[in-house]
Amino acid sequence: MREIHLYQWDDRLIWCPSQCYYYFKDKEGNIKCIYLRWRHNDPWTAEIAPLNEKLEFDFNAPWENLNPPFFKDSELDQLKEWCLKQSKVKDMLQTKS
């Protein structure tokens, strides 16, 4: 099982194509990920991805598109803030413990 850090952004794959991750526990105790991706051109995309027991993306379960407004590659910090403020995300987040 790989190591992840809950409730903080992981920017280790920020180079093109850029990917950022935010792992969190939902209210049922499942670990999910806000997955941000920039594919060599604007805009960024943002999805909530379920994880399997190995803490890898579960491609057999549905992903949720957050449908962010247009964010350029240089607006990553604004996108991160926007994602965490979305009611869909707030409703899923388990209180940090």
Image (tube, rainbow, N blue to C red):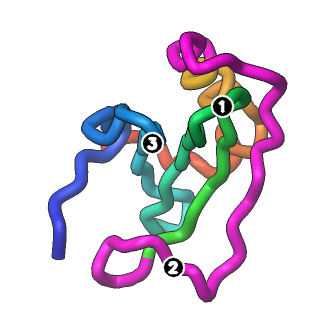
**Mark closest to the chain's N terminus, 2 or 1:** 1
Q: Amino acid at mark 1?
A: Asn
Q: Secondary structure at mark 1?
A: loop
**SS category of the residue bearing label 2:** loop
The stretch of residues the image draws in magenta is 52-78
Q: What residue is rendered at 82% in x and 41% in y?
A: 67
Viewer-nearest of discs 3 and 1 = 1
Q: Is the Cβ of the residue at disc 2 closer than 8 Å to that at disc 1?
A: no
Among the two numbered marks 3 and 1 on one chain, the one whose residue lies closer to the N terminus: 3
Verify CB contact (< 8 Å) between mark 3 and mark 2.
no
Badge 1: residue crowd in 10 Å (few <14, some 14–19, many ≥20): few
Quadrant where the N terminus lies? Answer: bottom left
Which residue is rendered at x = 37% and y = 38% of the image? 7
**Tag in front: 3 or 2:** 3
Residue 19 versus residue 48 in the image, above or below:
above
Queried whether the magenta region covers residue 97, the answer comes back as no
Packing grade of label 2 (10 A; few <14, some 14-19, many >=20) is some
Q: Which mark is residue 58?
A: 2
